[in-house]
Amino acid sequence: MTTLIRGGDVVAWDGSQHMILRGGDLVLDGNRIAFVGVGYAGPSDQTLELTGRLVCPGFINLHCEVALSHGPVWDDLVRPNLYAIRPESWLRDPDDTPMFTPEEVRAGARLSMSAALRCGSTTIAGINTMVLKRWDDAPWEPDIFADVADELGLRAYLSHHFRAGVLSGPPDAARVAWNDEAGRRGLDRGIAFVERMHRRSDDRVRGLLFPYTLDTMTRKLLRATKAAAQQLGTRIRMHFAQSRAEIERIRAQHGTDPVSFLEDLDFLGPDVILTHALYIAEDDDRDLDRLARAGVHVAHCPVVLRRTGRVLRSFSRYRRAGVNVGLGTDTFPPDMLEEMRWASIGSKLADRHAASGLAREVFEAATIGGARALGRDDLGRLAVGAKADVTIIDMRGLHIGPDDDPIRALVHYAVQENVEHVYVDGRHVVASGQVRGLDERETLRAGEGLVEKMIGLFAGWAGQPANRLVPPSFPVE
Amino acid sequence: MRTRIAGRWVIGYDGGHRIIPHGDVVYEDGRIVFAGRGYPGSADLTIDAQDCLISPGLINLHAVANVDLQVFRIDVESPGFPKARRWVEQPAATEVLSDREIEASARFSVACILRGGATTFGAITTMAPKRWEDPPAEPDAIARAAGELGGRAYVAHQYRAYVSYWDGSQSGWLADEARAFLGLERAKAFARRIDGAYEGRVRPYFFPYTCDASTPELLRASKAAADEFKTHLRTHFSQSWQEVETIIERYGTTPVRYLEGLGVLGGNVILTHALHIAGNGPYDDPRDDDLQLIAASGTSVCHCPVVYLRRGRTLNSFERYRRAGINLGLGTDTFPQDMLLEMRYAALASKFENGDPTAGTAAAVFDAATVGGALALGRDDLGRLAPGARADILVVNLSRLHIGPATDPIKALVYHASAADIETLIVDGRAVVERGRLQTADEEELVRAAQAPYDRYKAASPGGIAATVPNGRSSRPHCRFAR
């Protein structure tokens, strides 16, 4: 079946860069793009007249929380060190009973992934918080995420998260409890999951390997992970240089800095995506040069950083050094428009300069940068032969105002509500702002129950009433 | 007619805001009669808003009432909109916009301000493409737009005693105090003409444009006029290091002490931006008591985060000023005039400046956008849902996928919502926005009519008015356009 999307401003890929076709046509044929240009005269089964819209490549979210995020709970608060308050008795529970049932995980995933689609992401690389896990994900958990992505029609890279060390104690005196066996078991489960995804009939849901954080990995486990990724032909993503405490732990344990540590292991390469990469290259560009030379990708998640007053120093500087930067959300809502806007503003703040974090640069990060990170030359662009992943934004009205540079308007004025249509793999998954086939109210209600359960769990660990741990903004009557 | 709105949450008021789950707001004849749980009386009309937060209407203290020029500087490191000396000196000033374009520009912008969540706004217009004062038609056009489109507005005829110029190699000021006083007279005439118009929704205020483009006498006379009309004085204040230097050079003292010495601080004075004051930014006064001077005088500071964040700068900091006891309000000062976004970015910028997640809380920025703005305007009947207050109300749908579980409705509003989630906006008991659409004008028509003044201002920004543009480039498209 062919669909002609007619009349909007089309962000077309000319082989090396995005360009704007005013009043352009885009033709989707099955799950591929068959035509991008002006004045399509061929046949089509279906035509959408979309004058006044911006027709974009679907956004690629490199670090999308797919379970229910507890991040927003901590807005305005000093988040307690959740690793420090986890009770020993719970950690040592021999049953390793997951904190959430499969049905609860499914409900959280449905909320997070449908919101990602609603906000314009067509491809996500999933993550879920490990603070509620003892060692690794429950063996059934990533398969639930795969089911939900499948059901919603989202393109997803998913993983079974693993680690060989678990942190406990206060941040300044954190201990790492090591368990090589648990680490290896987690990697094996991660490999098995990727293999299961590779056997699927379509290629919309795939696997990647996700060693959780640098400071919870042993040399041996990192080497084994790299070897497995090469054998599977898959990507590796890892949290990297998220905190100064992490840098100090790496130094104490391995006697070197994080970039050198990975370089010495031959770990770095174009198959590696490092999320955050915040506390590197603080004095000079040498770390960035090394990452750029190795072809490593950085997943920048500006919104989750800003919650604690932090910014990357800086988005534009990393790009200038030749590092491929993509964007991720890492929290709720998975809203790539807000990520682009704050990537831009955060870069300007860090550089104290208006000509930093340009709209074009953050748009590239959200599209082509993400595609490069995932090694996909058929995503993040509207070009003949590329996957039919399209996000269409309504640019008509007071929120955008008079007609001018649509990319600047998208980054600086548009909001999630303006995302009108989303196509993934040729399927019309968001139509007129609604995720098709989703009971939005029921999905939200289930999410509210899960957040309350989560706050209750944390309050129990902290030995505090929930409304003391997370006080309301104003007194509640 | 008595109307009851039943919301999932009502933000009530009892000396401070309160969250009332499943509450009612009832209003009649433009005033609130009840805000709480379980209204015992009867109502002629009940609006069911079980997905929504019922909030006091927001107060935008520094709203751009013309098509905005600052957007042409997004992503461009440029000094602003320099004017050639010979253009400033032209005796018969032809304005950049025609009266018809001024009308279209004002109506479009006021519509954006209302859709952005403000029930009350303090209008400003850009002086970048102007010489000594507003074109005579402009303040009246803004007052008319506010009146007809249904907003509550404070409007001024703007004037100044200095105009800066740049001639490629040389920059400087042209000064003409007499012209500024003519402007002030025109501002008074405007104030007499419109005060109390549109059922009392439109009021005047006085606006010597910037502190450094005023003379001491002009500021004193403007303050006296504000007192006489029982309204406020607002000025752009301490926006740049150069401005601070100019004040020190001319008057031998720093900006806050300069105003204090003139008797121009006080409860009816609003300083917009106030970025560079002692203990803050590039200069330090050893006395370092600017924050205390501002706080003790009852002067309000209007913080406009978005316009400066786009330049990589911000107030240091919302939280520090607040803790010093300064009354803070919020303004937009640029397109898209979304007060929810301004609240969010005020909170986030403060966290950034303070390096502290607890700085600039959702509650504090919500206070600034409501009761803070009301106090700045000297209004105890705005910015709160309490019996006797004006029926200025915002209904925001927080039961949305992109907002997620709204366990704390104020945090959900500030951190996750945008103006696009506003369902209803009520001013003085009249629904100005319903189902997210302006009820008092055709939105598409407003945008269409704004294209001509927008294009004209764009052409006039760097390169048009200015002979040359120092170290800057005009705004360039982010992607090559192809045909």
Image: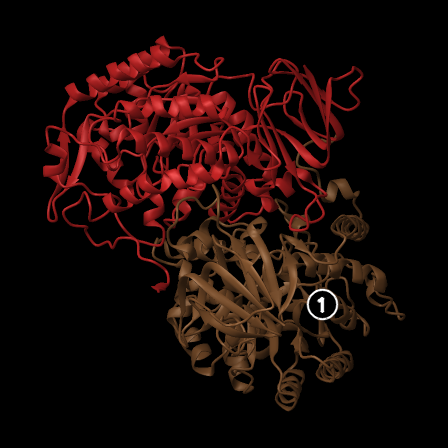
Chain colours: A brown, B red
Residue tagged by mark 1? Answer: A149
Q: Chain ID for label 1?
A: A
Q: How many labels does the image show?
A: 1
| A453 up-or-down from B324: above or below | below
State which quadrant residue B304 falls in.
Answer: top left
Give the SS element for disc 1.
helix
Q: Check disc 1: other Cα within 10 Å, few if <14, some if 14-19, many if 20+.
A: many
Between B35 and A245, the one nearer to me in the picture: B35
- Residue B467, position as x, y percentages in the image: 14, 47
Between A175 and B139, the one nearer to me in the picture: B139
- Residue A445, position as x, y percentages in the image: 78, 48
| Residue A59 visible in image | no
Between B296 and A132, the one nearer to me in the picture: A132
State which quadrant residue B294 falls in.
Answer: top left
For this view, does A32 lie left or right of residue B8? left
Q: Which residue is drawn at 52% across and 82% down?
A: A270
| Residue B356 visible in image | yes
Quadrant in the picture for the N terminus of chain B? top right
Q: Which residue is drawn at 83% across and 61% down?
A: A99
For this view, does A468 lie left or right of residue B96? right
